[in-house]
Amino acid sequence: MDLHKQLIEAVEKRFGKKISYQRDCKTLSEKVFEHTHEYISPATLRRLFGFLKTNSKPTRVTLDILARYCGYSHWQDFVENQIKASVTSKTNIPELWSLITTNTMEVNHHSIRSIQIKSGIPFEKTVRRTYLESLLNHFVSSNYTALAIVAPGGYGKSTFIAHWYLNYPKVKKQQIIPIIISASKLENYAFSELNIDEWLWSQIGINAFSIPNLKDELKKLPGTIVFIIDALDEVTLTGIKLERTLKGIHELAKEFSESANTKLIITSRYATWKSLQGYLINPEVWLNIDQSNFNSDNANIPPLSYDEMQAVLDNTVNEGKKERLLIFELPALLRQTISYPFYLQLFISSYGKANYQTLSDPLNIINEFIKQKVFDSIYPEEKADILNAIAKEWLENSGAINKQQLKKLYPINLKTAGNYFDAYHDLLSFGIISEEKVYTDSLGYSTLVSISNNNILTSLVAQKLIKEYGLSEKLITATKNLFSQNEIYPKLIGYIFSIGFNERKAAFLVDLFQLFLPNYIPELINTLTLCFKRDESLFKELLPHLLRNREAERELLLINPDLNGTSSTYRKILEQVQPSSPYYNDSKVAMDYCNLMGLEISHINNSNEWHNNFIMAEQNSARIAGMWFCLNIFFSTGSKTELMVKKALEFYKSINSASAKLEFRESVLPLVFIDKRFFPLQDILIEPLNLSAHQKALDSIIYEFTDLTKNRNPFTPEKHHQLMQNYSQLNPSRNHFAIVLGELARSISYFYESNLNDAHTCIRNSIELCGISGYRLQEMVLMKILGQTLIRLGETNHGKSFISYAETLSEKSGVKVYSEYFVYGS
């Protein structure tokens, strides 16, 4: 095999014609330099092509440059490909399949290793995403020939591809041969004269020229070949070379649709996908590209589910610890934030350090993201300039900035002018900023640039305002004047409050109360609760100022209480209510309700006081009325119990407001499913209350629980997923018991399927969440149920330990547990 001769033939093919004259060598020298930025003199080329006599062979440098001109990495890469190709041309179909299988092993080994090294947390501690793996499995068996996986940077696209490759049974049985190729290698194709399919097959040493009827031969293969071009956004080509590459990808999708046993997957960020989409030839062969498949992150794959986030936490921060950090105990906004895998990585990397308490504030995760992806990355000053310009436009005009305006400020469109071009496209590629084309009669088409994530935008605006005005009264006034009519105003208030709280500016926060209460109480309550849990001493200092406002006091006590903190935040608020407050009697009932939930039986007041307070409760708050009924039913016996249950049902039927009905239901729900005396109250949970996302989600969880226990039909994977989706719709200040109920339902479903591992995980989630929220009564009952179940399953030691813990709680409180239900005993 004359490899030098083959290189000369490849060069001539790349050049477009035979080198017949000496003048062709000069033109070739220029072409080589144009495409490789490496110089070979015309004299050297004349010697190589035989126009000048020589006894020496071409140098390795010359061979490397010419190999790169032909689309290879270097001379040795060219040699290896020619050797493999020569073998391929002589193989029959089984040998072709064997060759593909053998050659892809090394390619995939390097690709998988690269993905594992780049993983933000150790790859073995990342989680398999079964929902996404099922998408790939469906694609492989479907009639579609191309699949786009689109999401921002740090969303875990490459990681889940690696998990699928390593765990898919058909890959291990060699029924499916994935070939994972870094998209950066497409740059070699862009500078070659090869067709896209010829270049692609050459990546695994297959010479497409040597198999004249390749399409027909592929139909005879015993399995499917799946080419995966990973991280398309890493291609740095521009102009005609980028256009050629994007067109080539669509040509591949079209060609694969006309052949058999070959499929294409690309992973990309949204901005790159939109460029690729502009060259779409045949969209019908592509799966998962409809705009309805994309979420608010500009991703057509979902963020991490609760189960997936919990699995990652268990693999990292919970590893080797007795007390787990439970995903459900984190504030709802933080859970939503860290469902973006890169944010979860930031959370994990900071967890356990001195600043952990501040991590419960999603703002700090966002700020850490900005720090790592802007200020600690390449081109930090240029990125900061661009983001500040966009934020400034928001400050002045409450809108996106025109790209032409941005070009006048910074040369974001000129690749050769400083680093602004690269900085801009890095921000665009990572999904921090986005472009939108709009049309106006006066200007025609133009491009608007905005910060794509509202949390990032709000954080940047808040920091810019604070830098200009400081944490002062001027800041409060400026914020109101500039943004009171803007959609980000409530969130901006929360961010400013959170920053002031982190810096312990008590006087400033009191001023903030005066301006924003009562008009923005609902928007501030969740932020207040979140902050108060981080700093108890500052909480105590601020609480009296907050409770002086009757609307704020009513919101905290009755309308939007922190029922997730019956042993902490909510209890402390109740303790601060003064006798002069119109809600003082209500607060006493609520305190006894918290004592009941927390098994602090000895701290509960005389039942006559509950009865005397009922008139006040009935007039002012269905929530307090529900608590009052819970106390009276719990501590009653015999016919008196039946009478109180009957009165509770009558009271509920007399309520006209759907929101008041919800308040009553939320009060009695923690007892309805664990105390047989409360079972008749299940009737009040049937009526659908569809006024809000929270109500719909709660209704759905209750329905699924009752339907499961009645009909004993295990949940489908889709129903498990939908149930957890409902968790995110619940009110973050009173969602814990609903999640407890949902996890209990999922645990029962898994038990019905004999999936003991997942069943144990779900009921463990329920029990631990009860402990976090202060629901010791429910924790005790669930511990007893779990212990008895484990003993029946043969896990005697574990079962006895749970029962022992439940009996300890029972002895201390005087509350007895019998089988699955409990009754109160003196």
Image: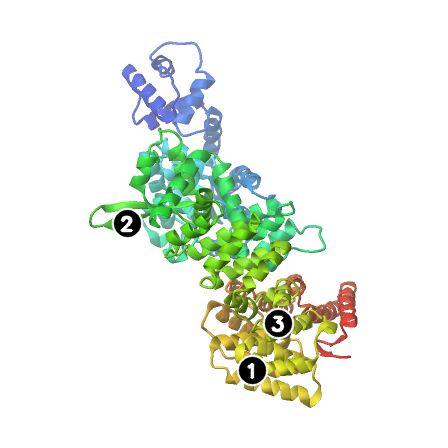
Above or below 649: residue 276: above
- From the image, tell me which residue sits under label 2: 438
Q: Tell whether 242 sits left or right of 185.
A: left
Among the two numbered marks 3 and 2 on one chain, the one whose residue lies closer to the N terminus: 2
Above or below 315: residue 721: below
Residue type at mark 3 is: Pro
**Residue 59: x percent and y percent?**
45, 16
Q: Residue at x 43, y 37 (%)?
A: 383
Q: Give how far apart the Cα atoms at labels 3 and 1 are.
A: 37 Å
Q: Tell whether 561 sits left or right of 258.
A: right
Tag shown at residue 579: 3
Q: Nearer the viewer, residue 252 or 640?
A: 640
Instruction: Say what secondary structure mark 1 lies in.
Output: helix
**Residue 574: x percent and y percent?**
62, 67
Q: Residue at x 50, y 82 (%)?
A: 655
Among the two numbered marks 3 and 1 on one chain, the one whose residue lies closer to the N terminus: 3
Of badges 3 and 2, nearer the viewer stands 3
Residue type at mark 1 is: Asp
Instruction: Say what secondary structure mark 2 lies in.
Output: strand
Above or below 147: residue 56: above
